[in-house]
Image (spheres, rainbow, N blue to C red):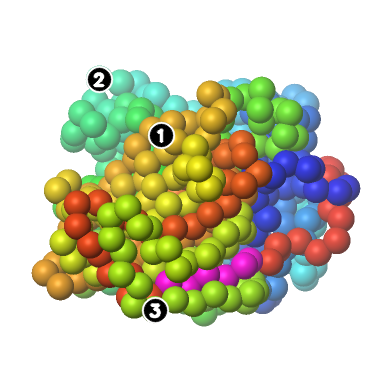
Amino acid sequence: MSRPEDPHRPAFHFLPPANWINDPNGLIHWRDRYHLFYQYNPNGAFHGTIHWGHAVSDDLVYWHDLPVALAPVPGGPDKDGVFSGCAVDRDGTPTLVYTGIGPEVQCVAEAADPGDPDLAAWTRRRDNPVIAAPPPSLAVRGFRDPFVWREDDGWYCAIGSGIKGRGGAVLLYRSPDLVRWEYLHELCISDREDTGDMWECPNFFPAGDRHVLLVSSIPPGSVLCMTGEYRAHRFVPEETTVLDEGGSFYAPQVMLDDRGRRLMWGWLRENRGADAQVAAGGSGALSLPTELSMNRDGTLRVRPVHEITSLRGAHSHYRDVPVRPGDGGGEIAIAGTRLELEAVFAAGGARQFGLHLFESPDGAERTRLFFDGARQALVLDRSASSLDPGAARDVRAAPMGLAPGEALTLRVFLDGSVIEVFANDRVVLSSRVYPTLPESRGVRPFAVGGPAALRALHAWEMRPIWRGDRVLPVAP
């Protein structure tokens, strides 16, 4: 099928040919191919009866659609939806562990032919559900999104949940075979009022000399990143931050590839009305694949994988451009809606400095990305991003200090309606914006309250990740 003619539709971020996508699922690197599963509604651009869509890539850049991997089975434990889960290699057999809906239970499916490079067919275990209910001693809010790993004494599974009257929680189970599971205890539970009543989509992994727990919290609908110590099969968080303050990023999943890289994708939610999503024929996209590691200060570092640079096309480059209040670096002429930008700023005397993105010539539409010295924050201002009253109009900010003499280094990806920002290897902002004017394509530096210096600015046009027409995935 041809791609819908929606100017806001991303071209180099993963999404299905049409309809609804949310959480990435079942990430696995199998026989030199990357497999990406995802929450998918084949019936339209809205959350409905959820299936597992499936795509494969040889290089993390270009993707090929495959048939739906898992569809709800009438009368089965996933009859009302195949919700989120993960993939593991069980002694040479790719195996999916996921949540079936109606009620929430945990299920297992195995690759019908592990030798098939597409892993196109999956067989459910006859003894599903393998975990039929949460522990009866707990009054839980939600019981879903298993994340599985292996230790010396067996398989471990973290399940997203919440304890009524206490807060978000991750429940820990152990199994010798991915089928017979025993509940151990809470891997981690909220001890703060602002971390939500229920935690979805847990991811738990070592990084450096620490462990990291990612959870998607309800409320406020953000991804919490906890770093701390894992001992006696309990996780003790030492620091908790919001992974991405941009207002769109949610429900990430991580994996290890055969090169030992810890990779992550997240769901980029729409920030416009439901009617607009249905009219566009699609809702949601996934973030760029990113590589996770630890900074020296113990914070999580998130960087786009190097392979993404292969999408770069025509290149523009500027050096040592003074940016004064009101002049906006007049010599710079960059415009486009599918771009990668790299910018390095020195503050000078400016209180605020950064880039206008998706800007119309008259300034009626624009998104402001800037460092605010007074707030010590990286800010994404969407208050004038769109003339559409149904689009998000807010100001997003992430705490970020600059050491004396430290430059602001921005790597920014613009893709139709997507903005992904990576700043100084420690702050990420992912958002959706929906300019209405065809001329809202400009990129311009700016400064407020004094001059700033734009030491370097690179801009590349970005190629799409799809080749030829696409066909809607269907169940095999």
Using the rendered view, name the quadrant where residue 469 is placed.
bottom right
Q: Which residue is mark 1?
A: 383
Disc 2 crowd rating (10 Å Cα; few below 14, some 14-19, many 20+) is few
Q: Position of residue 181 (x, y in %)?
A: 47, 44
Q: Does the rendering let one see residue 396?
A: yes
Q: Residue at x 44, y 45 (%)?
A: 367
Please tell me whether mark 3 sits on a helix, a strand or a loop. strand
Q: CA distance from mark 2 to mark 3?
A: 56 Å
Residue type at mark 1 is Ser
| 2 or 1: tag closer to the N-terminus | 2
Using the rendered view, name the quadrant where residue 318 is placed.
bottom left
User: Mainly helix, strand or loop, the magenta region?
Assistant: strand
Q: Position of residue 276 (x, y in %)?
A: 66, 28
Question: Over which residues does the magenta segment extend?
Answer: 457-462
Is residue 216 depicted above or below 91 in this figure? above
Identify the disc placed on residue 319.
3
Q: Residue at x 39, y 78 (%)?
A: 319
Q: Residue at x 35, y 72 (%)?
A: 321
Is residue 451 shown left or right of residue 10?
left
Residue type at mark 2 is Gly
